[in-house]
Amino acid sequence: MRRLAVLSALLVSASLCWAHGLNDRPPDARQLADLEARAATASPSEQPYIYAELVHSMTEMATAEFQAGDDARASASLKAAQGYAGKIQMSLLRDARKLKSAEILIRHTAFRLKELMTGASLDDRPTLEATIQQLNQVQSDMMTQIFRH
């Protein structure tokens, strides 16, 4: 029975990720610049989702950098993701659209970071753990906001 529940949860999570078009490819510099420009000019209600996209993109970039052995750049990418996660929390004070989609994206991103942590060096783990912890808090704040409305 428990296995069925775990399998169901995984399938639902995977289908939600597919439905929202999540991909695990690292973005290029142009894509990041476009996302940053969109976030800067977006209405306050749209910013949480765009910042969630930025967090996801920076996490995918950090994953590729860790796999390439460039730990310093990966750490910088994770710190940028933390900055964007902080902006999500600030933007939650306003009414936001696509909040559930942003929450799903943050959950997926935290899951990817947990996967990455299994192969990370001891030096990289504190940054990964701090980012995961912050994303979990952002996700919790989002869920509170979703159920408040």
Image: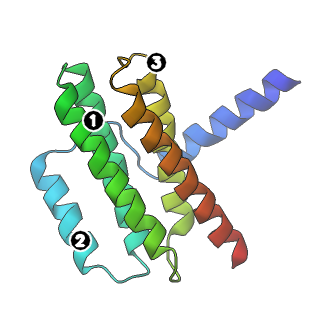
Q: Which numbered disc covers residue 62?
A: 1
Colour style of the rendered protein structure:
rainbow
Q: Which residue is mark 3?
A: 118
Q: Are marks 1 and 2 in contact (CB under 8 Å)?
A: no
User: Which quarter of the picture shows residue 100?
Assistant: bottom right
Q: Are marks 1 and 3 in contact (CB under 8 Å)?
A: no
Q: Residue at the spot x=21%, y=64% of the render?
A: 36
Nearest to the eye among marks 2 and 3: give it. 3
- Residue at disc 2, secondary structure: helix
Label 1: few (<14), some or many (≥20) within 10 Å? many
- Residue at disc 3, secondary structure: loop
Q: Quick one: label 1 or label 2, which is nearer the N terminus?
A: 2
- Residue at disc 1, secondary structure: helix
- Nearest the viewer among 29 and 121 is 121
User: Which quarter of the picture shows residue 143?
Assistant: bottom right
Q: Which residue is mark 2?
A: 38
